[in-house]
Amino acid sequence: FQPGSIPFLPPNEDGDYTHRNVTGSVCGDPSMVAKFAELASNIKKDAKMEGILVNLQVAPMATVCYLHPVNNTEDFEPPTFMDNTGAIGHDLLTDPQRKFIARVTVPSDGVVIAGPLTLRQCSDCDPTVQTAFIARMAIDALSEKQVIHIDGIDYKKWGFAVALINFAELVDRSEIGERFAIRGLRYQLTRTDKNYNAETKEFDVKVNILAGDEDFDLDENFYVSIDLDTTNNLWNIKVGNDNGFVPSWKNSAVAATVTGALILSFMFMIICIENQIRHDLLREMLPPKALRKIKKGQTCVEKYNVATVFFSDIVGYTAMSAEMSAIQVMKMLNEFYTEVDKIATKHKVCKIQTIGDAYMVTGGVPDRCVGPEGAKKVALFAIETIELAKDFRTSDGAKVVIRAGVNSGPLVAGVVGTKRPQYTVFGDTVNDAARMESTSEKMRIQCTDITYRLLRDSATHVFDIESKGGVEVKGKGIMKTWFINGATEKSKKHQSTLIENEGSTDDNCGDIHLYDDL
């Protein structure tokens, strides 16, 4: 949702507007809530930070939308629990107690950590769970429309990923108090906060004691003091004893404190990296439009009035597989299809899948374009793939012989599955493309009459196509087919004349349907 699209709830007792009414929005979608809970649960499990990593949240447009666990009983000994329901709808950019850290997080490229802070959602919880480190990282926008506006600057950000770290448990496990006590030392850890004052429109400064002696009254010559400057507050640790000393461990203390801060940042970074890796993998597997729909929990299905489909397989693959080891077969397929992938990228066709020795691409899907343009891209790809196979030899010296088939027509494309989603195409057009491949000849490209007519109308190339005659196709009877032998680019003058007469042939694909009657 965009800023302002979700109304605020009534102000709190201080008159501050801190929460939005997200009831009925996408934040309350049961399927999305369940998906986030599953993802967050896996992240918590993989992090192996039981009792420390106590909550994960996402905040689109800086408003907390999904969080897990909502009621955390898994990280605390009964009857202690952590109720997070009060965080839902929390607007991090308007809450005076959170806006400073949120404003710093938006333009930041890394993880921003603040705290320990008293949690808004858990003021009535057991004291042991009322405070936490809050680690946030800004997430880049998924579209040009997604911006967060701060001080006249538009930042292309979708929102935040947030993690809550149990400060009390972190201090307890560090055994910092015991370590100093063994050496006869006293210590005090403080944090200086900056909180926005709506009345004065300035930030008030407050010093809080986080750990150690409440009354640290040593003479300044009897202790050492070290400052650690964080995002929105200043941390300070004082260590000394009643008799004074020259600490030999001063440098070690600095190193240990800095290391602890780095470890905390690193743990949260790992969580964010895992999410980014998952996103990058999906981006490689799915077209951008399909990925956006999947993220919203929508079904991704699209109809295309005319597209072109290519199939190929390796002739004699079964016999080759019987004579070669499994490793040799995998090596051969990987070496050959890695080169074919490069050709697919060059001609801007979409690789749909490889199954065993079969390879499949489309033109005009998912990026729509006129029929002849999509057919041309696939044909040029097919021609260059055949040329590759003629000269190709694996590192073991094996030769690859392929046959190919091409067909054009209407089809449906979409994403199948959720655990390992796959973008694929369906329809009679796809089936006939597979039949063109199975009835083709070695090192030749067989196409249907529809594809032949589209290639004949290409504005940029003249294709060398010969008639094969009639081919018996199961379920279709006799189909007229053609062999694509090669292609020659037309002169620029001739292309310009065609463009003036027939319209642009650029790769600017859109919802263009010049061949919807095919």
Image (cartoon, helix red, strand yellow):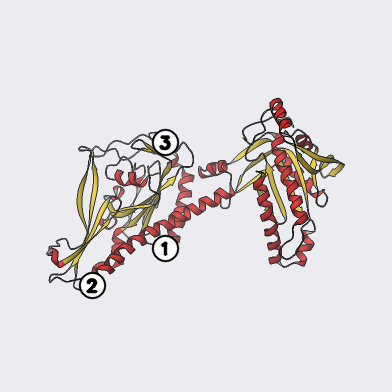
Locate the N terminus and report the quarter of the image it occupies. Answer: top left
Q: Amino acid at mark 2?
A: Ser
The alpha-carbon separation of the residues under discs 1 and 2 comes to 35 Å
Of mark 1 and mark 3, the one earlier in the sequence is: 3
- Asked where in the image residue 64 lies, by quadrant, the reply is top left
Neighbour tally class for label 3: few under 14, some 14-19, many 20 plus, Cα within 10 Å:
few
Give the percent coordinates (x, y) of residue 488: 76, 40
Locate the C terminus and report the quarter of the image it occupies. Answer: top right
**Residue shown at 70% from the left, 34% from the top:** 371
Q: For numbered disc 3, what is the local secondary structure? A: loop
The alpha-carbon separation of the residues under discs 3 and 2 comes to 55 Å
Of mark 1 and mark 2, the one earlier in the sequence is: 1
Q: For numbered disc 1, what is the local secondary structure? A: loop
**Residue shown at 30% from the left, 43% from the top:** 99
Identify residue for label 3. 2
Q: Nearer the viewer, residue 482 or 348?
A: 348
Identify residue for label 1. 48
Neighbour tally class for label 1: few under 14, some 14-19, many 20 plus, Cα within 10 Å:
few
Can the viewer see residue 164 in this picture? yes
Give the percent coordinates (x, y) of residue 445: 79, 46
Q: For numbered disc 2, what is the local secondary structure? A: loop
Left or right side of 357 for 51: left
Q: Nearer the viewer, residue 446 or 455?
A: 455
Instruction: Note whether 367 is above or below 237 in the view shown.
Output: above
Residue 248 badge = 2
Q: Amino acid at mark 3?
A: Gln
